[in-house]
């Protein structure tokens, strides 16, 4: 599932329902006939994914075999890369002139590559038919100006998992907003010795609380405002008391560890996290209920997106990337793991809301609901990952290190403006 530049909310589709892979893969053949490449000369397409082979090898082997049967002149070379290595490996390959043809990246990684002029503008290179299948807001996630640099693939809308036993012990119901959670955080911690929630990373909090990151023409930082100062001061009052964690804000892995050990009541994550919790903490899994994710003043929650990008302007690569992300193949993949499609037709399938008896089915239905009020937190500028890291340093300086909040935000503003100037 998509991260936000860092490995948050998992870097790839998590382990879930892998036994259904073979049956789901059968349906993908329906999509092959409309995905034939016009290329007639023999061509090899090198296809990189992120940490998918361990759990989904059978699924993708079937997908690739069907495509090669329909396109006998095309050979697909599938390479699966660990999440932590993919960006560095790709940058090295691009610099050396050996970049792959189709690559699985989250939006932030994709926009970082845009800043290095390393990706094909699919708004120009793809056909109208290829572009028309995606949900507009997700198609625009990797948009910079009039250019779009990725086919959106699978999304991972945040939903809330909460520990019913801890909630009962703390005498509260699941909050709907960050402000409601903050109001209850101190008493809850005193009553349970657990944290109510782990704050989102500062960059995301700014977006969720409707504090603009950049100015309208995206040339300057806009977040260094009294509203941002007040936001950090508010959270600092809770971390200083020890009722909210100071460190690892926004870390999916840290949140899961705390939740699985009974030290955290709420996790906002994708439905795919259920598989890990069930495997690693079956007793905690039995306490889980689901709800809508915590939101700020915008009412929006995060919907991290994975994409397929094309570093080389090659017709066969574009056709294959479009095939992997088409309606039928996205729906088939969603039936093997708790993710959500980025195409219009697949997202409307009854599969996502038909099972309300199991926890996984409830999570799927909640994901479909959350997707209506969620977005991939994209700035629409190159090098977003670098900008995001600079903004999060203001949190690290003020909350973790105890530095002056005003000074920390001023430094972050200067750093972001420098990055934006270098983008020009």
Image (cartoon, rainbow, N blue to C red):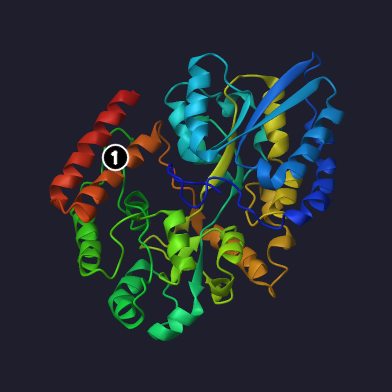
Residue 35 appears in which quarter of the rendering?
A: top right
Residue at 41% over, 64% down? 295
Residue 322 visible: yes
Nearest the camera: 239 or 181? 239
* Percent x, y of residue 409: 20, 46
Residue at 16% over, 54% down? 402
Does residue 276 appear left or right of residue 64 in this picture?
left
Nearest the camera: 259 or 350? 259
Residue 216 visible: no
Q: In the rendered view, would you say 71 is above or below 247? A: above
* Percent x, y of residue 397: 21, 48
Residue at 77% over, 38% down? 61
Local secondary structure at mark 1:
helix
* Percent x, y of residue 411: 18, 40
Q: In the rendered view, would you say 381 is above or below 397? A: above
Q: Quadrant of the C terminus?
A: top left
Does residue 219 appear left or right of residue 320 in this picture?
left
**In this figure, which residue is indicated by the disc labeled 1?**
390
Residue 130 appears in which quarter of the rendering?
A: top right
Q: How many marks?
A: 1
* Percent x, y of residue 239: 24, 64
Does residue 208 appear left or right of residue 47 in this picture?
left
Characterize the local packing of mark 1: few (<14), some (14-19) or many (20 or more) Cα atoms within 10 angstroms: many
Residue at 54% over, 46% down? 305
Residue 379 appears in which quarter of the rendering?
A: top left
Does residue 1 appear left or right of residue 69 in this picture?
left
């Amino acid at each position: 599932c998509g991260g936000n530049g860092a490995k948050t909310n998992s870097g790839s589709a998590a382990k879930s329902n892998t036994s259904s892979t073979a049956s789901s893969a059968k349906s993908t053949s329906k999509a092959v006939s409309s995905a034939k490449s016009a290329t007639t000369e023999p061509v090899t397409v090198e296809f990189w994914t992120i940490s998918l082979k361990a759990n989904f090898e059978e699924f993708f082997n079937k997908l690739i075999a069907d495509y090669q049967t329909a396109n006998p002149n095309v050979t697909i070379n599938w390479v699966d890369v660990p999440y932590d290595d993919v960006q560095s490996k790709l940058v090295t390959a691009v610099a050396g002139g050996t970049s792959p043809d189709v690559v699985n990246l989250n939006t932030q990684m994709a926009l970082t590559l845009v800043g290095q002029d390393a990706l094909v503008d699919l708004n120009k290179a793809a056909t109208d038919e290829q572009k028309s299948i995606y949900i507009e807001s997700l198609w625009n996630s990797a948009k910079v100006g009039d250019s779009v640099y990725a086919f959106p693939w699978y999304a991972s809308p945040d939903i809330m998992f909460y520990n019913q036993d801890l909630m009962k012990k703390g005498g509260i119901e699941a909050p709907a907003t960050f402000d409601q959670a903050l109001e209850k955080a101190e008493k809850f911690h005193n009553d349970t010795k657990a944290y109510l929630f782990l704050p989102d990373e500062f960059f995301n909090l700014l977006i969720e609380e409707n504090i603009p990151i950049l100015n309208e023409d995206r040339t300057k930082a806009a977040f260094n405002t009294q509203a941002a100062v007040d936001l950090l001061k508010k959270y600092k009052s809770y971390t200083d008391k020890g009722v909210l964690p100071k460190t690892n804000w926004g870390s999916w892995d840290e949140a899961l560890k705390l939740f699985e050990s009974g030290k955290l009541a709420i996790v906002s994550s994708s439905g795919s996290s259920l598989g890990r919790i069930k495997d690693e903490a079956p007793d905690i899994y039995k306490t889980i209920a689901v709800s809508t994710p915590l939101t700020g003043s915008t009412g929006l929650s995060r919907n991290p997106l994975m994409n397929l990008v094309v570093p080389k302007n090659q017709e066969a690569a574009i056709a294959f990337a479009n095939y992997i992300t088409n309606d039928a193949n996205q729906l088939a993949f969603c039936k093997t793991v708790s993710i959500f499609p980025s195409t219009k037709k697949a997202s409307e399938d009854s599969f996502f809301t038909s099972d309300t008896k199991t926890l996984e089915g409830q999570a799927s239905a909640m994901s479909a609901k959350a997707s209506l009020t969620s977005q991939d937190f994209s700035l629409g500028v190159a090098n977003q990952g670098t900008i995001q890291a600079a903004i999060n340093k203001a949190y690290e300086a003020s909350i973790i290190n105890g530095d002056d909040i005003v000074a920390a935000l001023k430094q972050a503003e200067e750093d972001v403006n420098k990055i934006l100037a270098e983008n020009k």
